[in-house]
Every structure is written in C-alpha cells, then in structure tokens.
Amino acid sequence: MNPKILHNGVQEFIRENEETDIYRLLLQQSPFPGISCRELAEQIASRKKASDKLPSWYSAPAIYFPNKRNLEQSSSEATAAYKASLVQVHTIFDLTGGFGVDTYYFSKNAGEVVYWEADEQLAEIAAHNLKELGALNVSCHHGDGLSWLIEKKPVANLIYLDPSRRSRDSKRVFLLSECRPDVPAHLPVLLKAAAHILVKTSPLLDLQAGLRELQYVREIHIVAVANEVKEVLWLLEKGFKGKPVVHTINLLRAGEQKFSFTLSQEKPAAGNYSEPLTYLYEPNAAIMKSGGFHSLGKALGLPRLQLHSHLYTSTELVDFPGRGFRIRRTEPFSRSVMKMLAYDKANISIRNFPLSVAEIRKKFRIAEGGPLYLFFTKTDGAGLILIECEKI
C-alpha cells in the first residue's frame, strides 16, 4: 500500500480521470513523485469497477482500492448486507477478511468484529478503508486467523469464513475440503470458539456435496443478484440435529424475491402437471440452484409443465419468485410450424429441449430481441412444444 495515493491531489486526479484510457495513461510519465502510472491506473480501474458493486466505497473520500483480482473476489454490498442481516450478535470473528466488505456490514450488526487476513497489503488496505467508512468497532489483524484461533483460544458468538477457492498452485477448486482453509477438517476447532459458523462458498458447489462435507447445517442461503447466483451461505449451529432449511433470495433493484423450503420436503418425482394455461412462470436463478421445484409448486398451488422442464403455469396471475409471462399461443414443435410462424426476432429460452438456443436461432433464422418471448420445452403429455409469450 502506497500512502502517497491517499493525498488530496492524487485522489482528485483519480476521480477526475475515471474515463481516461488506462493503456494510454500507462505510457505517460506519472504527474506525482513516488507514485507510478501503473498504481494510478490500478486505482482508477478498480474505483470505476466499484461504482456499481461497492457504491459506498466508490463515493467515500480517501478510499484505497486493491488490485482487480481482489476486487472481483470480494462480496458486493448487496450480498454483504444480506449476509449481515442473518447475524445480529455481539462478537464476530471474520477469519478470511479480504477487502473487508463483509466485515464492514457485520460491524453494523455486531458489537465487535475481529478481522484477519493473510495478505499483508490487503489487510493494510482494509484497515484503512474500514476506518474511513466509520467501522470503529473492527480490529484488523494480518496473519492466519485459524492459527490465532488454535493458539489463543478466543471465543465469539459467530465465526465467518470465505475460504479461498484456489489451491496453493492457483488452480480453481470446488470441494470445501480442497479450499483454504479446509473448513470441514477444522470444524471441531471452530465450534469450540463459537456456537455458530457462517461459511460462504462458490455458487457452483452442489448442495448435497456441501451437506456431505459439513456438520450441523441449520440453514442454507442461496443468494442471487439480478437473477445471477453469487454465493451460497451455510449457517452451522453447534449440536444442531434437525433438517436444514434452504432459503433462496434474489436481490433486485425493485425489491427481493424470497422462497424457503426444507430439503426433506422436496420429492423430485411428485407433483401436479398441466399443459400451458394462461400464464407461464420461470423460477429465478436462486430457486433453480436450490432444486426446490416440487416445494415451490406446492406452496403456490401451481402445476408444472413437466418434471424436468421447471416451468409453471396458471389460469390466474400469481406473485411468483421469478419471471412471469402471458401466453399468446402454444404449438407442437415442428419444422412446419416454425416455417408457418416465421419469427424474425424474439427472446428465446429452452427448458428440457434437445436443441440449444444457438441452434434454434441458426436453424430458423431468428434474431435476438423484440417484445416476444419463445419457450421451447416439453410437457408431460404433448411432448416438445413452443410457447409464445409476452412478459408481464
């Protein structure tokens, strides 16, 4: 961390050059002694990237930004705020603090937060920014938080971990036991220090695989932002023996879509099926990740088109956690039908269908866009069909 970057004139330069060509800047001579053009370019690029993801950091004065990779790996403010809403306790240990976004939001709901980060420069950056943002109840430390826990044996109400999903040779890994730190292997130590553990994992981690590796899972939270799953959270409670509840959340500018169920209630082969009626519904990405399709249909009283199509239908409009469409027409899928309809432009989705979107566009010469939505799918009775819709 170069403290000269925090000087008022340098910060003003960074703000004023947000739209500057970074590559051209790298070829110029730095206007500030002791600061390279590469450092200036990194600050400008990272600050610009933070404008949507981290608006509080973007708008605050004297914020020091990390490199692009560290920024990409950090939580967004939206997901960090949701995470913090789950834990209102006195003391939290954040053992994998990173850029400090989660730490900052934990500090709003906790009396004390202890931050640990193995990367010395990142820990220094986070400590500075957290102070600038007014998180005065956070104590920041550089080092191995897990080793500190083992050696000093402190206690907290909750421990938070976001294990690195890269091995020591920088290869991407997915199983929890392959991540650093290895949470499953260290659960006994963690649960001696706190009765509750919150673990953030990759959106790609299979829920059943996670349950096989972890113990005492009370809740699983699948968090999506604008219909893209960003993280899966595992809340562990020491000694918990019940069935975990799965919470799906889709954070949108207009509000939130939430749906919860227990895995023990999900019966893949069960369900009510129907041909397309008046309205069609597509679950959001968090629900698609959860696999709670039977539970969703049962909770809302909606039939599905087919076991593996994951589309729902109704005669009356319902409030649905996903996208809703008014059906204009339904046709059996065939080359002759497609030739008759002769679509020039449409938004295309496939569900349990033998052709990809790209293949459909190429085969029937359908451009992307426009007000029409075409679903190519399969029903329980009619087989392959085309559903022409308009978005509600």
Image: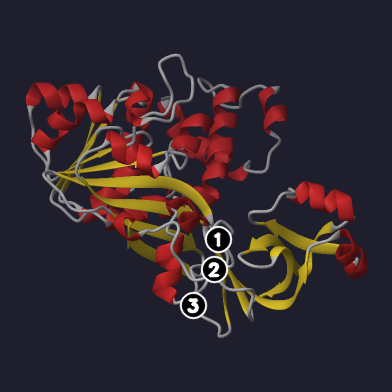
Label 1 sits on residue: 310
Residue 195, quarter of picture: top left
Give SS at disc 3.
Answer: loop
- Which kind of residue does numbered mark 1 sit on? His
- In the rendered view, tell whether residue 178 sits above or below residue 365: above
| Image vertical order of residue 113 relative to residue 36, above or below | below
Element type where label 1 sits in the image: loop
Label 3 sits on residue: 319
Image height of 352 relative to 136, above or below? below
Residue at image coords 60%, 30%: 41
Q: Residue lying furthest top in this view? A: 169
The reply to whether dot 1 and dot 2 touch (C-beta < 8 Å) is yes
Q: Nearer the viewer, mark 3 or mark 1?
A: 1
Dot placed on the residue nearer the N-terminal end, 3 or 1: 1
Task: Estimate the spatial distance between the alpha carbons at disc 1 and disc 2, rounded to whole Å.
Answer: 7 Å
Which is nearer the eye, 207 or 173?
207
Return the disc, 1 or 2, that comes first in the chain's sequence: 2
Task: Please indicate, yes or no, whether residue 66 appears anywhere in the rendered image.
Answer: no
Quarter in which the C terminus is drawn: bottom right
* Residue 201 % position (x, y): 38, 39
- The residue labelled by disc 2 is 304
Q: Amino acid at mark 2?
A: Arg
Residue 287 x, y percent position in the rendering: 46, 58
